[in-house]
Amino acid sequence: MNVVDRVRLGLAVGVAKTITAAVRFLGLGAASVLPGAISRRFHPRLLSLLCEQVKQGVILVVGTNGKTTTSLLLRTILEDQNYQLCHNETGANLINGLVTTLLGNTNLIGTLTADYAILEVDENIVPLLLKDCQPSLILGLNLFRDQLDRYGEVDAISQRWQQAIAPLSPNTVIILNADDPTLSYLGQQLTQTVRYFGLSEDNLYLEEIPHAVDSIYCPSCGHPLTYQGVYLSHLGDYCCEKCGFKKSPLDLNSKDWPQILIGVYNKYNTLAAGLVAQELGVKTTAIFETVKNFKAAFGRAEELTVKGKHVRILLSKNPVGMNETIRAVNDIKKIGKSSTTLLVLNDRIPDGTDVSWIWDVDTEPLVKLRGNLIVSGDRTYDMALRLKYSQETLNEKNNHVELIVKENLKEAIETALNLTTEAETLHIVPTYSAMLEVRGILTGRQIL
């Protein structure tokens, strides 16, 4: 780094740290984006200069669902091995947020001493990021339709990823979910070293393919894929009988692995972080020990005790995520450990302003099991209507569930807590901004 770059980097760092201190002192937020946005004006290559200083490399965690939980698990595994890390733990996963994270881990003259930088990255900015960042490893979790007002179809995103990854160094390691046909095909087109994680447990197959399916056609020839079984949305064991495309061989056996938290989706998160850690040289026994003691990130299957009641918050922001949440909640309801579920639907920018995705969610299994369903949030009545139409009949005499509508979120939470016994778990299923509100009410403080 030449003298001019060093001076400009020092100015950027000074500005970033001053803004961060001011924003936090005034109680205006976590300062997870603004410092990076302003500091980038001091040097056009600021992101590149910061990434180049990470000693052992930058790890990008990309995909639609599971980035935060997987990143936190990977971070915990590496911290347990005494590595020094920086990580955008606030979830600010666009360019300005990534720059803010890196700047926050430098000293006053802009020197960054982290061994690894674990960066959760919004799937739509991967091509833009790779223009200024040469990662040592890219972890691709999955590709689902997410916020309908922001993103296109998964095939288009995958094609952009391939174009952006192809020019990277041959030393870059790519780790992908083989159960996702789109990502498996992507890996088969790359020249870099590619390793795969996935499930090999037919006892976890779904009984039928859910409505929220994004990729059931062969990414090579367009012919319908033949599935031996489906684990989650379009993730499963598959092949194309027309062109011969099939699921890539796995680099680990999921049957041998424990998992963090609840749900099939968290088995995927565990395998993803575990395979990355193995690639970085961490012993499997050490990984398993961390998995055993892992604590959830806020809102991601996080467990709280409120007024003597056990509460679990399950962030759900798209059809696939909510389907898996419903699957996990129902497993607990079936054994009599939960009778009340609170669903909170918002339509703010972090959630996606188009909430029509709730009609792609298979809410029928949740309604079919008896119990209390409470709805709240900015779009309370949209969710209530979806649940109403999930009943086998709209005849009140045949209702399987007690549907309670509460526009006021505090009242909704209070009602849910009152209906939950001390032997049960209250499940709260919110979208992103709703999760922050829920958590603020339950803990008495905001996260961001």
Image (cartoon, rainbow, N blue to C red):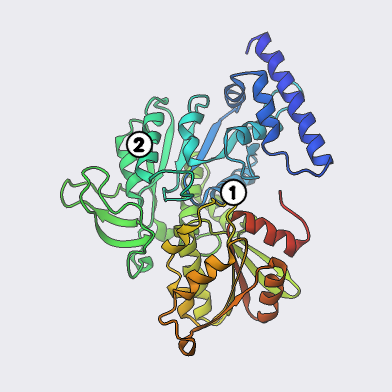
Question: Which numbered dot is residue 159?
Answer: 2
Q: Is residue 269 above or below residue 95?
A: below
Q: What is the crowding at mark 2: few (fewer than 14 residues within 10 Å), some, or many (at least 20)?
A: few
Q: Earlier in the sequence, mark 2 or mark 1?
A: 2
Q: Position of residue 79 (x, y in %)?
A: 64, 44
| Residue type at tag 2 | Gln
- Tag 1: residue type? Pro
* Residue 377 place in picture, x, y as percent: 62, 63
Residue at 56%, 50% (x, y): give it: 286
- Residue at 45% x, 43% y: name it: 151
- Asked whether 56 or 6 is in front, the reply is 6
Tell me, yes or no, if residue 320 can be seen here: yes
C-alpha gap between disc 2 and disc 1: 25 Å
Res. 236 mark = none
Please give left or right for residue 125 compared with residue 158 in the image: right
407 or 96, which is in the foreground? 407
Q: In the figure, 146 relative to 163: above or below?
A: below
SS class of the residue under badge 1? Answer: loop
| 378 to the left or right of 201 | right
Q: Is residue 405 above or below residue 288?
A: below
Q: Which residue is mark 1?
A: 350
Q: Residue furthest top?
A: 3
Residue 348: x and y in percent read: 60, 51
Quadrant of the drawing holding the N terminus: top right
